[in-house]
């Protein structure tokens, strides 16, 4: 199997980038997409050329490290699949593919297909945790959780922070990512003590990172490899409005003339 790849090559954040054409021969249909890029890089290294830089770690769809655009679709054409889980049997012999990094102001390109996603880390640091001192660790099943809420919390907790939602959104919004992190904790009793502060701080940090606003296009849900639902964004909005109302500063009295 032969593929023609057009890959975005960019030396560093300050350098201009461009699409470069490559031909990859002898591609096995059972290879993952990243294994195919490994074959390309081995060929480039053998010719003393700079290999294509791309993020990866677990290669099992768990860590959220990998991710780029394939023919304009985040993570490629298979729904609910990361790039590392995408196999070459889904492509045709001789097919041309265009590979580009995530495109968002908050995700500056570092090199080739690698972008800086530390903005996500700062959103998490703003409130995506539970810091209440509980003493010794309690038995995991000692605190009852309503099954409906537990299921919704676990669905939201599946978010791996890959950034596909941002790349697919025409506004480069991080609402689905932030909403998944807020929803996960807002639904659990263990995280209620910081519920309002979490919503306010994480939304504020998302805005500070210059992500766009959500206008309900739904592209984020369509490309999410863990199929996080849009309803989480509605829950985040409710959490934010609730927190803003509860922590609203009282109006100052003004003296009459």
Image (cartoon, rainbow, N blue to C red):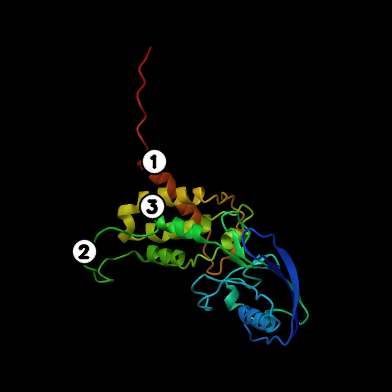
For label 3, the crowd category at 10 Å Cα-Cα, with few meaning under 14, some 14 to 19 and many 20 or more, is many
The answer to whether 195 is drawn above or below residue 72 in the figure is above
Find disc 1 in the rendering and name its residue.
Answer: 245
> In the rendered structure, which disc, 2 or 3, sits on the residue that comes first in sequence?
2
> In the rendered structure, which disc, 1 or 3, sits on the residue that comes first in sequence?
3
Find disc 3 in the rendering and name its residue.
Answer: 198
Q: What residue do we see at 62% from left, 70% from top?
A: 75
Q: What residue do we see at 36% from left, 60% from top?
A: 129
The answer to whether 47 is drawn above or below residue 137 in the figure is below
Alpha carbons under labels 1 and 2: distance apart = 31 Å
For residue 135, the mark is 2
Q: Residue 16 sits in which quadrant?
A: bottom right
Alpha carbons under labels 2 and 3: distance apart = 21 Å
Alpha carbons under labels 1 and 3: distance apart = 14 Å
On the image, the x and y values in percent for residue 54 come to: 60, 72
The answer to whether 157 is drawn above or below residue 195 in the figure is below
For residue 199, the mark is none
Total residue callouts: 3
Locate the C terminus by quadrant.
Answer: top left
Q: Are marks 2 and 3 in contact (CB under 8 Å)?
A: no
On the image, the x and y values in percent for residue 91 come to: 71, 79
Towards the viewer: 116 or 156:
116
SS at badge 2: loop
On the image, the x and y values in percent for residue 57 come to: 51, 76
């Amino acid at each position: 199997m032969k593929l023609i790849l057009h890959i975005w090559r960019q030396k560093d954040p300050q350098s201009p980038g461009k699409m470069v054409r490559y031909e990859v021969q002898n591609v096995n249909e059972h290879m993952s997409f990243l294994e195919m890029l490994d074959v390309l890089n081995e060929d480039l290294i053998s010719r003393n050329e700079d290999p294509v830089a791309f993020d990866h770690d677990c290669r099992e769809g768990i860590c959220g490290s990998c991710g780029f655009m394939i023919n304009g679709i985040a993570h490629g054409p298979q729904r609910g699949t990361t790039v590392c889980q995408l196999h070459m049997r889904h492509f045709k012999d001789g097919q041309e593919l265009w590979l580009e990094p995530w495109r968002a102001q908050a995700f500056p390109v570092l090199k080739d297909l690698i972008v800086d996603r530390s903005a996500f880390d700062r959103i998490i640091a703003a409130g995506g945790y539970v810091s209440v001192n509980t003493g010794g660790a309690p038995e995991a099943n000692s605190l009852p959780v309503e099954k409906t809420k537990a299921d919704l919390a676990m669905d939201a907790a599946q978010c791996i922070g890959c950034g596909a939602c941002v790349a697919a959104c025409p506004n480069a919004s991080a609402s689905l990512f932030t909403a998944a992190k807020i929803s996960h904790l807002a639904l659990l009793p263990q995280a209620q003590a910081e519920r309002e502060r979490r919503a306010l701080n994480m939304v504020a940090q998302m805005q500070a990172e210059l992500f766009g606003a959500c206008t309900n296009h739904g592209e984020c849900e369509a490309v999410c490899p863990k199929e996080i639902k849009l309803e989480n964004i509605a829950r985040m909005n409710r959490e934010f409005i609730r927190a803003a109302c509860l922590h609203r500063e009282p109006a100052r009295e003004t003296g009459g003339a």
